[in-house]
Amino acid sequence: MDQFLPSQQSVLTMDSAASTAATAALAPNGAADPAAAIDDDDDGVPEVAACISSMVDRGGSVESHRLFLARRTALEMLRDRGYSVPEEELARTLPEFRAWWADKPELERLAFSTTLASDPSNKVKVVFCPPEPVKIAVIREIYSGVKEDNLSRLILILQSRVMSRAKESIKEIFPFKVDTFQITELLVNITKHVLKPKHEVLTAEEKAKLLKEYNVVDSQLPRMLETDAVARYHGLGKGTVVKVTYDSELTGNHVTYRCIF
């Protein structure tokens, strides 16, 4: 692998601690004291409840936060596809990313490439596109930068819309598979959502065994679109079979299979 750059009292009454805090927040005339509602911190920012304090980002720009989240999800996506991804890259924190990124904030630094763990000759690269609308010139420039890398697949992360002609040119210019994701699609990892059932991609041998066991062919299995969010996350092509395991109070516990088409 190369070029890896860098989960009792009634609610109607108030306990003694809360009562004391409420009393302290009142001015002598009984009116609420605005100053008491403000935290004593020098930044003058109102105090945030502990349950959501970890979700508040006060350390840097929105851009760096978005890029950090999208890059991390892309790394997790490649790991789930079977590619080799260093644990230190997955463990990188937002402050660490910002310290590295702010040193030289160029999109080229966010690009990374890796190989399939089971087949080192299968190489993939992730490239972040500029925030402007993507035109044919940008697609050609990207191709010029990767044509010597012997890639089997390319993933483009877009920060803006891609022009229709540029979208068509992707299939014309690149001799290998190209996946495109809007950066907003990668801000969270959809496979980690609590309501998302477990998806497992079957190998060719497991698929053959399944079809033989039930005496069916691909077209007789329930279907999943190639454009489905989970199918895109795993980079699945037509004919691939996915085992879907449901386990919740709403759906019950059962297993089904989907064939990509």
Image (spheres, grey):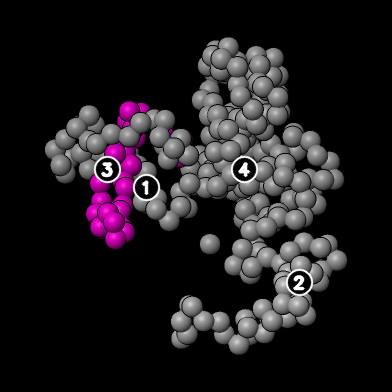
Q: Position of residue 204 (x, y in %)?
A: 32, 38
Question: Toward the viewer: 200 or 57?
Answer: 57
Residue 257 magenta-highlighted:
yes
- Which residue is at 17% across, 40% downward? 212
Q: Earlier in the sequence, mark 4 or mark 3?
A: 4
Against 22, residue 93 (above or below) is above
Q: CA distance from mark 1 to mark 3?
A: 9 Å
**Amino acid type, callout 2:** Asp
Residue position marked by numbered label 3 in the rendering? 257
Give the residue pinned by disc 4: 70
Q: Gap in Å between the C-alphas at discs 3 and 2?
A: 61 Å
Q: Quadrant of residue 182?
A: top right
* Of the two numbered discs 4 and 3 in the rendering, the one whose residue sits closer to the viewer: 4
Do labels 4 and 3 touch, CB within 8 Å? Answer: no
Q: Disc 2 vs disc 4: Cβ atoms closer than 8 Å?
A: no
In x, y percent, where is residue 70? 62, 42
Q: Residue at x 61, y 63 (%)?
A: 52
Give the amino acid type for the residue marked by disc 4 in the picture: Ala
| Comes first in the chain, label 1 or label 3 | 1
What amino acid type is highlighted by mark number 3? Tyr
Q: Pointer 2: what residue?
A: 33
- In the picture, measured across the screen, residue 1 lies left or right of residue 38, that is left
Q: What residue sits right under mark 1 in the picture?
A: 200
Quarter of the rendering occupied by the N terminus: top right
Q: Which residues are magenta?
A: 234-261
Sequence-first disc among 2 and 1: 2
Horizontal arrangement in the rendering, residue 119 relative to residue 110 (left or right): left
Q: Main secondary structure of the magenta part?
A: strand
State left or right for residue 188 relative to residue 237: right
Callout 4 environment at 10 Å: few (<14), some (14 to 19), or many (20+)?
A: many
Look at the numbered disc 1 and give the secondary structure of its residue: strand
Q: Residues within 10 Å of mark 3 (few under 14, many from 20)?
A: some
